[in-house]
Image (tube, rainbow, N blue to C red):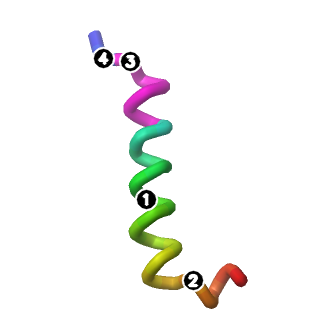
Amino acid sequence: AFNQEKIYSGFIYYFRIFYFTDNFDLFF
């Protein structure tokens, strides 16, 4: 009985931190 929205938003949050910091100039 996990909260799917919390898991999904948490995954996106950490993904954005790690992915954007490693590939910052690909998006900006």
Q: Residue 2, percent across and down?
A: 30, 17
Q: Please name the residue that numbered disc 4 is placed on.
A: 2
> Which dot marks residue 24?
2
Quarter of the picture containing the C terminus is bottom right
The amino acid type of the residue labelled 3 equals: Asn
Label 2 SS:
helix
Q: Please name the residue that numbered disc 1 is placed on.
A: 15
Tell me which numbered mark, 4 or 1, is placed earlier along the sequence.
Answer: 4
The amino acid type of the residue labelled 1 equals: Phe
Q: Residues within 10 Å of mark 1 (few under 14, many from 20)?
A: few
Residue 19 among those drawn in magenta: no
Residue 7 among those drawn in magenta: yes
Q: CA distance from mark 3 to mark 2?
A: 30 Å
Residue pictured at 49% horizontal, 37% vertical: 9
Disc 3 vs disc 2: which is toward the camera?
2
Tell me which numbered mark, 3 or 2, is placed earlier along the sequence.
Answer: 3
For the residues bearing labels 4 and 3, Cβ distance under 8 angstroms: yes
